[in-house]
Image (cartoon, grey):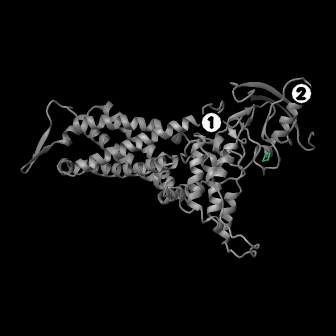
C-alpha cells in the first residue's frame, strides 16, 4: 500500500495542504487590513504582488494545494460514507455524539469553494464595471482595486454573502487547524487544549479580519 | 432476580431484528416488564428473551460473555450511543437505574461495513482480529527465561503503555465514529507495543502493516472528532491516534519495498 492511497497518508496531505492554505488565508487577511491605512497603500500592495513575476509560481502552487486538499478530502469523505452503509435510526446526543462542525466539514468546504470562485471572478478577473478602474501614483498606473472594492461592497447583498462566507471559512478552520496538526501526529495532554484554543483564536482573527473590510466599507459608504 | 433496594420499571423497546447477513432487517417493538433497576442492561434483555421464549417467539440475539466489563464481547448502540449513556462503561456494566419507568429504548447493532450483522444485534468483529494479526511479531531473545526486571521501563511509560493495552477490542470506537473509523482501536494496539522497549524493533513496520489492514477492512478515516474516546469503555486517549499517525508516516518514509 502506498502512502498516498492510505487513509492516514491522505489525511496528512489534506492536513498539510490545509495548513498551507491557513497561512495563505492569514496573509491575505492581513493584506486586506491595509484598507484601514489608505487607498494608496491598499492599491500599491496589490500592485506589488501582481507585478512580481513570481506571482505565477505562487498562484500555480496555491491552485495545486487547493485542488489537492479538495480532491483527497473528497476521496476520504467517500470512503467514510461507504464505511457505514446502514445509518443509525437514533443519533447520539451528549458527549458520545459527533460535533456539528466535524459533521459538516464537507458542506463548509463547498460553500468556501463557491465563495472562492465567485471572489476570484469579482476581484481578480471580474468585469464588475465595464472598464477596469485605474489609478496613478507618481508615474505608475495600476488597478484601482480600492475603488472596485468600494463599488462591490456598496451592495448590501454582496456584503451579507461575503460576511457569511468568511464566517463559514472561520468555522471550517476552527476544527481544521487543530485537527490537521493532530493528524500530523502532534497531540499531547500537555498542549492539546492550548492547540484547540489556538485554532479557535486563529479562526476568530481570520474571520473578524476578513469581515471587517466589507462592513467598514459598506458603513462608510452610507 | 428482583433487586432488594431498587424498584421495578416497565420499558418499551425498539429492537433491531435481522435474520441474517443478507436480510434487510427492521425494528420490532417489544416490552420489558417488571425490570428491577438493579439489573444490568443485558439482564433486562435476558428477562425480555425469557418472556419471548415462553410465548413461543424467537428471542433477540445479542453478544455477551464475561458480563463484568473486561472481555469486550458485549456491544449494542442504545438510544444512539455505543454501550449506552454512561462514560467508561460497557453495556454489560450499564444498569437499569439509568432508565425511567415508561422509557422507550432503541437498541441497534454496531453499524459499520467492516462489522457485518450476523443476526439481530450480533455483528462480526473479526476485522479486528485480522488487524491484530497484521501487526506481526515482536522480536525477542530465545533461550533461558530472562531475569525479571532486566529491562527497565519508566513508570510514566509503563502507565501509558498500560492505558493503551486496556483496550478490550469491543468496537465501540467504530460504532460511535461518524466515519466508522477504527483509528482508536488500531492506535491503541500500536501504542501499547510501540511504547515499550520490547515492541520497539518492529515499531514503524507494525504501524504501517496494521494501518494497511485497517484500510483494507473498509473502516473510514479519522476526523479527530473524539466520539470514539467518549464511547470507549476503557477511555482510551486520542493521543494514541496521533502516535499511530506519526509512526505510520515514519514507517512509510523508511519503507523500501
Ligand atoms: S460481556 Fe464482557 S465486556 Fe461486556
**Which dot, 1 or 2, sits closer to the camera?**
1
What x and y, as percent, mark residue B24? 68, 24
**What residue would you read off at disc 2?**
B53
Describe the element under mark 1 as helix, strand or loop. Answer: loop
* Residue pointed to by mark 1: B113
- Residue drawn at x 41%, y 35% is A110
| Labels 1 and 2 within one chain | yes
A66 left or right, relative to A38: right
Residue A108 on image: x %, y %: 44, 38
Q: Is residue A10 left or right of residue B205?
A: left
Label 1 CA crowd tier, 10 Å (few <14, some 14–19, many 20+):
some
Q: Tell which of A142 and B213 is nearer to you.
A: B213
- Chain of the residue under label 2: B
Q: Chain of mark 1?
A: B
Can residue B37 be seen from the camera position used here? yes
Residue B104 - label: none
Q: Is residue A32 above or below residue B161?
A: above
Q: Nearer the viewer, residue A74 or A47?
A: A74
Label 1 residue near ligand 1, CB within 8 Å: no
Residue A74 appears at what percent x and percent y?
46, 38
- Local packing at callout 2 (Cα closer than 10 Å; few below 14, some 14-19, many 20+) is few
Indicate the quadrant where residue B65 lies: top right
Is label 2 in a helix, a strand or a loop?
A: helix
Q: Is residue A200 above or below residue B121?
A: below
In-front residue for pair B95/A75: A75
Q: Residue at x 23, y 49 (%)?
A: A55
- For image coordinates 64% across by 45% down, the residue present is A95
Percent coordinates x, y for residue A204 in the rendering = 42, 49
Q: Is residue A177 above or below residue A87?
A: below
Which badge, 1 or 2, is on the more N-terminal residue? Answer: 2
Q: CA distance from mark 1 to mark 2?
A: 31 Å
Amino acid at each position: 500500500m502506498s502512502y498516498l492511497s492510505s487513509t492516514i497518508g491522505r489525511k496528512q496531505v489534506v492536513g498539510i495542504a490545509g495548513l498551507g492554505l491557513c497561512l495563505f488565508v492569514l496573509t491575505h487577511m492581513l493584506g486586506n487590513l491595509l484598507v484601514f491605512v489608505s487607498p494608496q497603500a491598499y492599491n500599491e500592495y496589490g500592485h506589488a504582488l501582481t507585478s512580481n513575476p513570481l506571482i505565477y509560481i505562487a498562484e500555480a502552487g496555491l491552485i495545486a494545494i487547493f485542488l489537492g486538499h479538495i480532491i483527497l478530502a473528497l476521496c476520504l469523505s467517500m470512503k467514510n460514507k461507504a464505511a457505514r452503509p446502514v445509518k443509525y435510526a437514533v443519533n447520539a446526543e451528549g458527549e458520545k455524539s459527533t460535533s456539528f462542525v466535524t459533521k459538516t466539514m464537507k458542506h463548509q468546504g463547498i460553500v468556501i469553494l463557491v465563495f472562492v470562485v465567485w471572489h476570484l471572478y469579482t476581484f481578480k478577473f471580474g468585469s464588475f464595471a465595464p472598464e477596469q478602474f485605474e489609478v496613478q501614483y507618481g508615474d505608475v498606473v495600476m488597478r484601482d482595486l480600492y475603488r472596485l472594492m468600494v463599488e462591490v461592497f456598496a451592495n448590501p447583498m454582496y456584503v451579507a454573502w461575503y460576511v457569511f462566507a468568511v464566517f463559514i471559512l472561520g468555522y471550517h478552520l476552527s476544527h481544521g487547524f487543530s485537527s490537521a496538526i493532530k493528524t500530523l501526529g502532534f497531540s499531547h495532554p500537555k498542549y492539546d487544549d492550548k492547540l484547540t484554543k489556538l485554532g479557535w483564536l486563529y479562526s476568530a482573527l481570520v474571520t473578524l479580519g476578513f469581515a471587517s473590510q466589507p462592513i467598514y466599507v459598506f458603513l462608510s459608504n452610507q | 432476580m428482583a433487586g432488594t433496594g431498587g424498584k421495578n420499571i416497565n420499558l418499551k423497546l425498539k429492537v433491531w431484528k435481522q435474520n441474517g447477513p443478507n436480510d434487510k432487517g427492521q425494528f420490532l417493538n417489544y416490552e420489558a416488564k417488571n425490570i428491577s433497576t438493579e439489573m444490568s442492561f443485558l439482564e433486562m434483555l435476558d428477562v425480555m428473551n425469557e418472556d419471548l421464549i415462553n410465548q413461543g417467539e424467537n428471542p433477540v440475539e445479542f453478544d455477551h460473555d464475561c458480563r463484568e466489563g473486561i472481555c469486550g464481547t458485549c456491544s449494542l448502540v442504545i438510544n444512539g450511543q455505543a454501550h449506552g449513556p454512561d462514560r467508561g462503561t460497557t453495556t454489560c456494566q450499564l444498569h437499569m437505574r439509568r432508565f425511567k419507568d415508561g422509557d422507550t429504548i432503541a437498541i441497534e447493532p454496531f453499524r459499520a461495513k467492516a462489522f457485518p450483522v450476523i443476526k439481530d444485534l450480533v455483528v462480526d468483529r473479526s476485522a479486528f482480529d485480522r488487524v491484530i494479526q497484521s501487526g506481526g511479531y515482536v522480536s525477542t531473545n530465545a533461550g533461558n527465561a530472562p531475569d525479571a526486571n532486566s529491562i527497565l521501563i519508566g513508570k510514566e511509560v509503563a502507565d501509558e503503555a498500560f492505558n493503551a493495552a486496556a483496550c478490550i477490542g469491543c468496537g465501540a470506537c467504530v460504532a460511535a465514529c461518524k466515519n466508522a473509523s477504527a483509528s482508536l482501536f488500531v492506535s491503541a494496539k500500536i501504542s501499547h507495543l510501540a511504547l515499550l522497549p520490547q515492541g520497539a524493533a518492529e515499531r514503524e513496520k507494525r504501524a504501517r502493516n496494521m494501518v494497511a489492514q485497517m484500510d483494507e477492512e473498509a473502516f473510514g478515516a479519522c476526523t479527530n472528532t473524539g466520539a470514539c474516546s467518549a464511547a470507549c469503555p476503557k477511555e482510551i486517549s486520542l493521543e494514541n491516534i496521533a502516535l499511530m499517525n506519526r509512526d505510520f508516516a515514519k514507517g512509510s518514509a523508511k519503507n523500501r519495498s
